[in-house]
């Protein structure tokens, strides 16, 4: 559209100002590496160096820190990595554009089970290999992965301090982490206890809540189990005096495998219970909640007879005892009250196993009942599950399938228990249940709750301060606040120990010379271990002999060995804030940005460790982050999660190479370098990292983001539009017959911004107004981290305001106008060019670098690189202060343009015209037009002193001639054309389009305007192609004058 036609006569072509540029239609892979280096490593180093000292005004530039949440170093990069890292980079680049000194230190989470498992799989080893070998394999995998991922991130033009990137497996990081642990211990926030934790049999380690996911469709086998009870004398002589014994209670459990660990049965003091008789089961008497009787009868599929009701749970608690059939040696066990018991499900009586549930644990702890969990690390029963008959349960797996025929059914602990209960007439019913259940977020296998000795962080001790810190944080999106608050509020403890080798050790010693293996930890032990780690490194914790005395401080008597528990990886990454320098009364980071799942993970662990180690307990504390941004997940074009099984996984490299789009049949272009392509190999529309970045920038990352071929086609089309636009602009600045009169883009911005623009042609006024509006919109959107809105505004401006409007109006003025015309336009376009370059610098840095490389030498030499010049809001002198003049004129232009194009299309359909220049336009106005904006636009008084009104209008609407007259005059003109056609005196063709324009000036009014598109009255000028020549094959007056005055 912007390229001049090749059919111009050669004699006149040489007299035109035709733009040419060597800027290629597509990026060339052969030079991308150099542009990548300039716009990333070089730019980051420059801003770090140049903005470390006071500027010319003596002011030290403001700093900005985006702290990187470390990705796991356990696999290749995927599209989610791109969404995360590129969004961070866009933020950093925009802040550089705001004149700030930006700090972005990339990092990697190198410890943890995922890396350990993958390392073992790669070497065909099992989890039973020694800790030293495990650590060696995991460390090598993490090192390789970090190098591969770093290379990928840098290829996406993610700039940062790559030479100082942090890794959680580095000695310095591990020492800082242990220092945080020490400070938390000294504040009484670290303790060891035998209590229930989430345990993953598939991973053989304890898990924190942040390491859980939930299976919404988990299937369990629930059981109703009878326990014969012994009734106290109080009940026998009181409320149950009329009831014959024996008496039973029935509990309902979704985890029958926990029955061997049963220590009590709970009722609620405020629930009313009944004694019911089962006439079909030898008249068995059972206590159930009165409100659950109907449901229990439905399960049994028979009616029960109510013998007595009105029994309060407060009367039953403490007055009933029973025997656990799997632990008869323990004797009778109590029926107790528990606040969490409800009558919403089951029977209103709850089986209590303090070794397998936190609520149960707390209820029993208050009564001095110890936790008991006869399950080993693999999730199998130990012989303690049924001491009198160990062969029944020992080795049975508590999470094995309960459906006959499924693999592992024979090893099912649940089915073994069900069979035993059935044999002894204790099972009353079974129920298949589908419900939500926690699973290991890595192995996707069910977890159990199991009491073990673990190390914990006391979240209750810092919860109030953490909540006050959250109040100071800005959340994007706002829903992030409630998510983080809910995770912190619902947490009382944090299990920080893991039974794995690949991690930072819990700095505990265990005394072994008294026949015990008890943990010992105090402040002096931790400090001593830290000193040894500084000297020998973390690996020595595992490689040194167990009894090496160097690890034992002198104040400890006896013989000690080092513990083998490691820290939760969230404790690792949660202490990464320690590498950031403190800032006076400010959070150490301006932004933390990660996926929405990190509210329960890194965001929370960072907040808790920071709050725990800063300030006194009574003091308010700043959070580690000023703003917390979360992004969604990536989905395919059908809205599905990406997975290998579905075959919908997209690699970032497929986007940068263009191979997801149809292959191209590329033709060799004259004058442009072409990379060599191997014979037979398909050629793809290579758009480089900017395609990936533009997809990220154009997506609303606060929700789940889709990607697929339709989206990528749109991205590539947009990038091509950018390139075509810049190519034309570069050609305008490179005209040999009309060199620009300015030598600096920066200087011309100041000149135009302070100039009285109302003296410019109306097209220039309107375009500058739209450019100023774009600058304000994009600044606002970028500042609010709404990059997709900024990109949409840029795309709309380029497509509608530049390509479809302003560039169309300029072609005649540039190509065929006077040198003065051309140079004036170059100045306006310089402002447009530089503003677009600065707006796109954070989004498409390689494109901006490539475009800048093709800027004419003198201009580039006299200007500051657009990525290095602070980007300020464009503020022009208003043509009429306080009045939206340009917007008013733009609305009227749009109304008239729409009507004009409708009439032109009808004429094209009749084969009367082709180009919009092949017509003249008349606008018929009412006699007393009240819309003064429209009147001024068409009849003059726009303030324009550049050209005559008629020519300005013709340029504005890209027609040969345009004039306005009264409606009556227009009707008379049409009548005259009609009469001429009837007489056969020269054919005149035309089309009419009526427009009703609503205006409001005190009252709502509507005026009708007649737009007439007609055959030109003059001849086509062979130089400019406008129908303004007075004679056939002759030049129009303007071209005649230009050719003569410029000696063309």
Image (tube, helix red, strand yellow):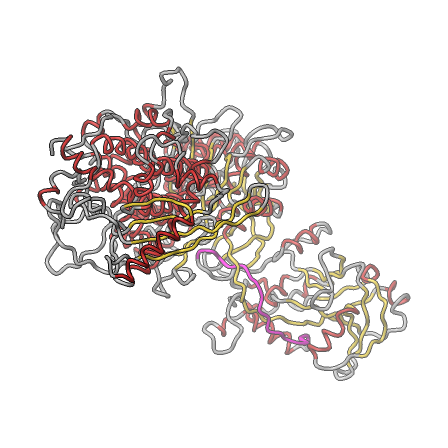
* Quarter of the figure that contains the C terminus: top left
Query: How far across and down, in percent of the image, does residue 575 sit?
Result: 47, 37
The image quadrant that residue 175 belongs to is top left
Q: Which residue is drawn at 84% across and 66% down?
A: 311
The location of residue 479, given as percent across then percent down, is 56, 47
Q: Which residue is rendered at x = 77% and y = 83% of the image?
A: 282
Of residue 722 and residue 561, the one placed in the foreground of this image is 722
Position of 762 with respect to 402 (left or right) is: left
Q: Nearer the viewer, residue 963 or 461?
A: 963
Residue 434 magenta: yes
Residue at image location 81% in from the left, 72% down from the top: 275
Taking the image as shown, residue 964 lies to the left or right of residue 656, namely right
Above or below residue 417? Residue 580 is: above
Magenta part, dominant SS: strand
Q: Which residue lies furthest to the bottom in this view?
A: 280
Give the camera-side residue of 40 and 646.
40
* Rendered image quadrant of residue 424: bottom right
Read off the magenta span. Answer: 426-442
**In the picture shown, does residue 177 fall above or below 3?**
above
Q: Is 20 above or below relative to 987?
A: above
Q: Where is residue 988 in the image (x, y as percent from the top left)?
A: 27, 57
Query: Does any portion of residue 103 appear in the rendered image?
Result: yes
Asked whether residue 28 appears in the rendered view, the answer is: no
Left or right: where does residue 411 sit relative to residue 982? right
Q: How many marks?
A: 0
Residue pushed farthest left?
Answer: 11
> Residue 553: x and y, percent?
48, 31
- Which one is in front, 889 or 800? 889
Residue 734 on the magenta segment: no
């Amino acid at each position: 559209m912007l390229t001049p036609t090749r059919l111009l006569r050669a004699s006149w072509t040489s007299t035109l100002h035709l733009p040419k540029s060597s800027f290629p239609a597509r990026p060339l892979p052969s030079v991308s590496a150099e542009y990548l280096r300039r716009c990333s490593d070089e730019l980051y180093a420059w801003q770090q160096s140049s903005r470390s000292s006071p500027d010319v005004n003596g002011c030290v530039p403001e700093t900005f820190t985006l702290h990187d949440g470390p990705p796991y170093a356990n696999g290749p990069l995927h599209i989610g990595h791109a969404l995360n890292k590129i969004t961070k980079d866009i933020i950093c680049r925009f802040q550089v554009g705001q004149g700030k000194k930006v700090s972005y230190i990339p990092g990697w989470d190198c410890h943890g089970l995922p890396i350990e498992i993958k390392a073992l799989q790669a070497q065909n080893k099992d989890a039973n290999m020694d800790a030293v070998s495990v650590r060696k394999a995991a460390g090598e995998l993490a090192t390789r992965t970090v190098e591969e991922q770093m290379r990928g991130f840098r290829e996406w033009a993610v700039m940062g301090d790559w030479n100082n990137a942090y890794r959680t497996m580095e000695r310095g990081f591990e020492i800082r982490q242990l220092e945080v642990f020490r400070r938390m211990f000294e504040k009484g926030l670290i303790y060891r206890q035998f209590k229930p934790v989430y345990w993953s049999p598939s991973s053989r380690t304890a898990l924190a809540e942040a390491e859980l996911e939930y299976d919404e469709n988990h299937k369990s086998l629930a059981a109703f189990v009878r326990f014969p009870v012994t009734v106290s004398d109080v009940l026998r002589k009181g409320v149950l005096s009329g009831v014959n014994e024996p008496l039973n209670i029935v509990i309902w459990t979704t985890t029958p495998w926990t029955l061997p660990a049963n220590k009590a049965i709970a009722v609620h003091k405020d629930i009313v219970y009944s004694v019911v008789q089962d006439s079909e089961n030898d008249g068995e008497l059972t206590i159930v909640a009165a409100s659950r009787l109907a449901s229990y009868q439905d399960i049994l599929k028979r009616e029960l007879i109510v013998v007595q009701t009105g029994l309060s749970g407060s009367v039953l608690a403490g007055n009933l005892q029973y025997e656990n059939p799997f632990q008869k040696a323990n004797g009778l066990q109590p029926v107790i009250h528990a606040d969490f018991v409800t009558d919403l499900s089951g029977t209103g009586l709850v089986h209590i196993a303090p070794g397998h549930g936190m609520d149960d644990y707390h209820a029993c702890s208050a009564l001095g009942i110890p936790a008991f969990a006869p399950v080993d690390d693999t999730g199998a029963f130990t012989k303690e599950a049924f001491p009198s008959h160990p062969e029944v349960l020992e080795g049975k797996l508590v999470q094995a399938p309960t459906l006959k025929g499924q693999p592992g059914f024979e090893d099912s602990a649940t089915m073994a228990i069900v069979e035993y209960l059935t044999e002894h007439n204790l099972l009353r019913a079974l129920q298949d249940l589908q419900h939500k259940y926690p699973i290991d977020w890595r192995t996707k296998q069910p977890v159990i709750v199991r009491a073990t000795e673990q190390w914990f962080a006391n979240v209750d001790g810092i919860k109030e301060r953490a909540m006050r810190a959250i109040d100071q944080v800005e959340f994007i999106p706002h829903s992030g606040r409630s998510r983080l608050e809910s995770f912190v509020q619902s947490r009382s403890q944090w299990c920080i120990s893991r039974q794995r080798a690949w991690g930072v050790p819990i700095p505990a010693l265990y005394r072994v010379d008294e026949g015990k293996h008890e943990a010992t930890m105090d402040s002096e032990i931790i400090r001593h271990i830290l000193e040894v780690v500084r000297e020998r490194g973390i690996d020595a914790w595992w490689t040194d002999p167990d009894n090496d005395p160097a690890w034992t401080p002198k104040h400890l008597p006896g013989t000690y060995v080092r513990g083998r528990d490691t820290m939760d990886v969230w404790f690792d990454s949660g202490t990464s804030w320690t590498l950031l320098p403190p800032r006076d009364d400010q959070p150490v980071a301006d932004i933390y940005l990660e996926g929405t799942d990190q509210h329960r993970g890194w965001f929370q662990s960072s907040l808790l460790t920071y709050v725990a180690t800063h300030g006194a307990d009574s003091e308010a504390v700043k959070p580690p982050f000023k703003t917390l941004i979360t992004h969604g997940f990536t989905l395919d074009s059908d809205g599905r999660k990406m997975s290998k099984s579905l075959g919908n996984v997209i690699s970032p490299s497929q986007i940068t190479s263009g191979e997801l789009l149809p292959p191209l049949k590329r033709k060799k272009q004259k004058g442009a370098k072409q990379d060599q392509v191997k014979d037979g190999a398909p050629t793809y529309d290579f758009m480089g990292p900017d395609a990936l970045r533009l997809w990220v920038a154009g997506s609303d990352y606060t929700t789940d983001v889709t990607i697929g071929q339709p989206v990528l086609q749109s991205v590539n089309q947009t990038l091509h539009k950018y390139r075509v636009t810049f190519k034309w602009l570069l050609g305008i600045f490179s005209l040999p017959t009309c060199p620009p009169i300015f030598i600096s883009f920066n200087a011309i911005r100041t000149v135009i911004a302070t100039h009285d623009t109302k003296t410019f042609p109306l097209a220039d006024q309107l375009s500058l107004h739209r450019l100023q509006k774009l600058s304000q919109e994009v600044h606002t959107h970028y500042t609010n981290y709404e990059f997709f809105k900024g990109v949409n505004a840029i795309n709309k401006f380029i497509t509608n305001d530049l390509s479809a409007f302003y560039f169309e109006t300029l072609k005649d003025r540039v190509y065929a106008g006077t040198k003065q015309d051309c140079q004036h336009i170059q100045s306006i376009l310089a402002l447009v060019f530089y503003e677009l370059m600065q707006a796109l610098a954070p989004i498409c840095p390689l494109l901006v670098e490539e475009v800048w490389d093709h800027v004419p030498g003198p201009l580039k030499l006299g200007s500051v690189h657009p990525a290095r010049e602070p980007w300020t809001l464009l503020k022009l002198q208003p043509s009429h202060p306080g009045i939206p003049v340009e917007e008013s004129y733009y609305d009227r232009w749009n109304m008239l343009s729409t009507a004009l194009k409708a009439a032109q299309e009808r004429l094209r359909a009749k084969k009367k015209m082709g180009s919009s220049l092949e017509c003249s336009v008349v606008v018929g106005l009412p006699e007393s037009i009240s819309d003064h904006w429209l009147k001024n636009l068409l009849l003059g008084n726009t303030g324009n002193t550049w050209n005559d009104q008629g020519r300005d209008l013709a340029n504005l609407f890209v027609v040969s001639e345009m004039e306005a007259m009264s409606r009556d005059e227009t009707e008379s003109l049409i009548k005259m054309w009609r009469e001429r056609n009837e007489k056969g005196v020269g054919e005149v063709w035309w089309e009419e389009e009526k427009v009703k324009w609503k205006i409001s000036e005190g009252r709502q009014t509507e005026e009708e305007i007649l737009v007439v598109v007609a055959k030109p009255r003059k001849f086509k000028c062979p130089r400019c192609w406008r129908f303004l020549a007075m004679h056939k094959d002759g030049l129009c007056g303007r071209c005649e004058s230009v050719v003569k005055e410029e000696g063309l």
